[in-house]
Image (cartoon, rainbow, N blue to C red):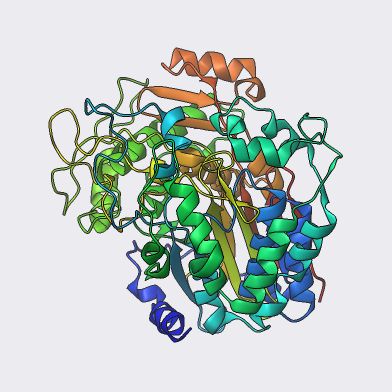
Amino acid sequence: MQLFQKLFAVVASVSLGACVATPVPQAAVSEAAPAAAEPFVIAANPLAAQAGLNVLKRGGSAVDAAIATQAMLTLVEPQSSGLGGGAFLHHYDAQRRKTTVLDGRETAPAQATPGLFLDAQGQPLPFDQAVLSGRATGVPGVVNMLAAAHVDLGRLEWSTLFAEAERTATAGFIVSPRLARLVRGNYPQNSATDVVAYFSKPDGTRVQAGDRLRNPAYADFLRRLAAQGPGAMYSGSTAARIVARTRSGPLGGSMTLADLANYRPVPREPVCGAYRAYRVCAPPPPSSGVGLIQLLMLLERTDIAARGPSDPQAWFLFAEASRLMYADRDRYVGDVSTVPVAGLIDPGYVASRAQLIGQAAGPAPQAGVPAGAVVAGSDSTLEPAGTSHFIVRDAAGNVVSMTTTVESIFGSGRMVDGFFLNNQMTDFAFKPTDDSGRPVPNAVAPGKRPRSSMVPTILLTPDGQFAGAIGSAGGNAILAYVAKSLVAAIDWGLPMQQAIAQPNLVARGASFNGEVTKFPPAVLAALRARGIDLKPGQGEDSGVHGVLIRNGRVDGGFDPRREGVVLTLPR
């Protein structure tokens, strides 16, 4: 545990002044402080949110509640996140007015090679084949990350944080409509042996909404995790079973017990920038917080704030700014030291990119050349939709904004001790070079972390008070989902619940996807006239959870596309 303490001590020393940032406007949101003592939990499942709130009722910290929330999400929302996956934890320290990021992203095994997902002819494997393979799983990071955070930021004993999830796993939980729908979805994982076994009833049919699902194997693991700490995951019998499950065919992986024993979370400085009256901070590479901040800066250089959700020009501007951001993000961001973070959000560079927004959508935009950029190959990483996001604030005003994932639906479809293993390795580029032979930043390498679109974000006033938090599920679309919700809440003045419910539009490259049936026909027609023919999206769609402090009160919202809830603890 001393190692985790040392890691988080490094994290805690990062100040707002150390963030990469652009100047904050003087027009400040000054009403944030009065609500600092109202605890809350926002999560994608009521049982998970309640588990976190119950920890807050016992005097637990935001990190304590986050641990309990994640333990329950692993059980009741296994299609999205779990202890066999990874996460980014963004923490706000109310006393010091500082935000810190702890990177619990999965890592590639030490024996991984750049050609991990290439066939004998050097061509990329079909995704459906890769995702079910033993090679798909990276070394899980969320448990070690939470343990590291708990050393410095926990108030309650680690051993007391898993009891509610353990009891629920033993007694069983009622299968929700969304889980029942996804169990029957057209996903490759639903053919996996472990998925079929777990979700099948004695008569061979799949569970339905309203059925009770028990998971005694997970309950047993939680008892050991509570008693032994993270060693229950990274050594001993569970670690041996993870290695065996990932090394089995088809296409067995190379993970070893040493890979698990050597996993460490990484403390990172958040990337910060300004949007309207807020200071916006998000995780740096290998996550894509720099992309989110760039997108907001691009939108601030348009008149989108003077428009609204019924104005097609607002959605056109959002789409074109998104395409510019994704072109840069896809070209430069990865777990490499050459990401030009400062250059990507330099005001002059952003202004030059914003000038590319014309009257109509043209061909897919090319990446720009920001200061500090080095030659990089074009990236074609698929990055399917998945993941979950939750937000916790404790009685002291400390906040956790955490995005957590096993990658796509039920991860790799392989289960150990009642939880699914991630398929995060498929978040790497399958081809290590582009068609011109240039290396791509997101290529596989030993110990490397795949690029992520997870952006658990925290908003601050210029003097460092907590002003809000937001994040989402949705693969590469996360950046668009979060930005849309912020525009709707901040620029259009909508309550957070209404802001999140606004139709999703994801513009990346030559593709324009979104919730076609939720846009008025007149808006769709006007977008077509501007060169944007919106097509239905795919996958899990968004899972935005967000909060703003308005007039001293918590304005929280959950994504109506999921089964979330906002729970508060009155003071």
Tell me if I can see residue 509 in this picture.
yes
Q: Is residue 363 left or right of residue 128?
A: left
Q: Position of residue 422 (x, y in %)?
A: 50, 48
Q: Position of residue 362 (x, y in %)?
A: 32, 20
Q: Is residue 327 left or right of residue 24?
A: left
Q: Position of residue 215 (x, y in %)?
A: 74, 53
Picture quarter containing residue 49?
bottom right
117 above or below 338?
Answer: above
Tell me if I can see residue 393 in this picture.
no
Count of numbered marks? 0
The residue sitting at 65% across, 47% down in the picture is 78
The residue sitting at 59% across, 62% down in the picture is 468
334 above or below 133?
Answer: below
Picture quarter containing residue 248?
top left
The residue sitting at 54% across, 82% down in the picture is 151
Residue nearest the observer in this picture, 279 or 201: 201
Q: Position of residue 557 (x, y in %)?
A: 70, 51
Residue nearest the observer in this picture, 149 or 200: 200
Residue nearest the observer in this picture, 348 or 533: 533
Residue nearest the observer in this picture, 208 or 429: 208
Picture quarter containing residue 74?
bottom right
In the rendered image, which quarter contains the C terminus?
bottom right
